[in-house]
Amino acid sequence: MFLKFATRREFLNFGKLSLLFFLNSCSNLPNKVKIAFQNSFYPESFKDIIPKDWKQEKINFENIRLQKNRNTFFNSDLILINDGWISSIDFAEFEKINEHALIENLDKRSIDFLGSFNQNQRSKLLPIGVVPYTIIIKNNKELINSARTSWDFLLSKKLTGKIIFPQSPRIILSISQKISSSNPLKKLKSQAMLFDDKNMLNWLINSDACVAIVPYSLCSKYLKIDPRLSLVFPNQGVPLMWHFLLSRSNLNNEILIQWIKSLENKSIVDKLVSQGWYLPFKSDYLQSKYKSEMFPISSPSEKCWENSWSFPVLTNEQKINLKNFWNESLTP
């Protein structure tokens, strides 16, 4: 009846109203929060605590220029990234996230590390996890005690050509600075079997290598299944890998606050720590994990944490100096 008697103008107006109603209905439909991260860097216990109604997206920062990764990057609400890839992103593409309600929950270690970034970067970075590097020793129990004391043990003649180092000159240089010897970087590099970030544990298990230096969160499962492997955290401290959350959308901070608060559940904290992931928040139970001496072999001691170090973003000049210093150490 309406179509029969309505004027053409009334019909068009009705169509416009219908379209507006339809679009408004669509806009009110709940959209899943999309969170993107490089899958290989995160233990299963961490991925399990991401809310079930969020959509997890895989991204590869090593090939961030590939269209597939760019699409994932631009279509995600949240990005998880470790400090090694911070320099590969444009902070102008992110929203402020580190507002009072979130930053007041951070512990001193994470606040101090944030202080090493400029104001623009600092306002868009939310520390979500810190992972200590660890030393994995294979079939050499006699090395454990000396490894717990200092990094000097890496220069042992028994380890010549049998150490797997991270593929990061900056990490290797920082370790060499802890060694009490002349030309420590050159000597350290001469001990290397190879430099690898992806397959270091496979190489350690299936070769003549005796030692590997790896992020704790990447090796916990291997320690459970291979009795030849021992875990050591030197009292001199270890390099720390930081993970941050960044927001690409105007996401309601209440959503993030609820998630972060849920991470402080004691059973979740215990599970994360057992897989090498430490939360950088200031609750008493979380902080006890940095001080506990109940499991001195399977976790860093309080002294180790106190002496551990982080890596702020390098300036272009610092990058050039690091590259030159690394190359000079290769010369005879």
Image (tube, rainbow, N blue to C red):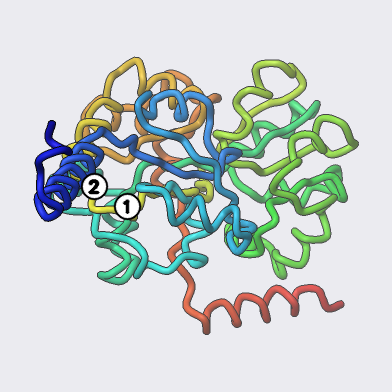
Q: Which element carries disc 2, helix, strand or loop?
A: loop
Graded by Cα atoms within 10 Å as few (under 14), some (14 to 19) or many (20 or more), the crowding at tag 1 reads many
Q: Nearer the viewer, residue 59 or 290?
A: 59
Placement of 179 over or under 90, stated as above or below = above
Amino acid type at image mark 1: Ser
Residue sitting at x 61%, y 34%: 218
Quadrant location of the C terminus? bottom right
Question: In this rendering, is residue 248 above or below 281?
Answer: below
The residue under the point 54% across, 24% down is: 298
Location of residue 167 (image quadrant)? bottom right
- Report whether 223 appears left or right of 298: right
Quadrant in which the N terminus appears: top left
The residue labelled by disc 1 is 247
Helix, strand, or loop for circle 1? strand
Residue 68 percent coordinates (x, y): 60, 53
Q: Is residue 253 visible?
A: no
Label placed on residue 87: none
The answer to the question of whether label 1 and label 2 lie on touching residues, with beta carbons closer than 8 A, is yes
Mark 2 Cα shell of 10 Å, populated few (<14), some (14-19), many (≥20): some
Q: Is residue 278 among what the camera can see? A: yes
Does 110 appear above or below 181? above
Marks 1 and 2, how far apart at CA? 7 Å
Of 56 and 235, nearer the camera is 56
Q: Which picture quadrant has residue 168?
A: bottom right
Pointer 2 residue: 251
Percent position (x, y) of residue 29? 25, 34
Q: Quick check: 112 left or right of 144? A: left
Q: Amino acid at mark 2?
A: Leu
Rendered residue at 35%/48% (across/down): 77
Residue extending farthest right? 208
Residue 36 in picture, x, y percent from top left: 46, 44
Q: Where in the figure is residue 73, as x and y percent of width and height?
A: 47, 54
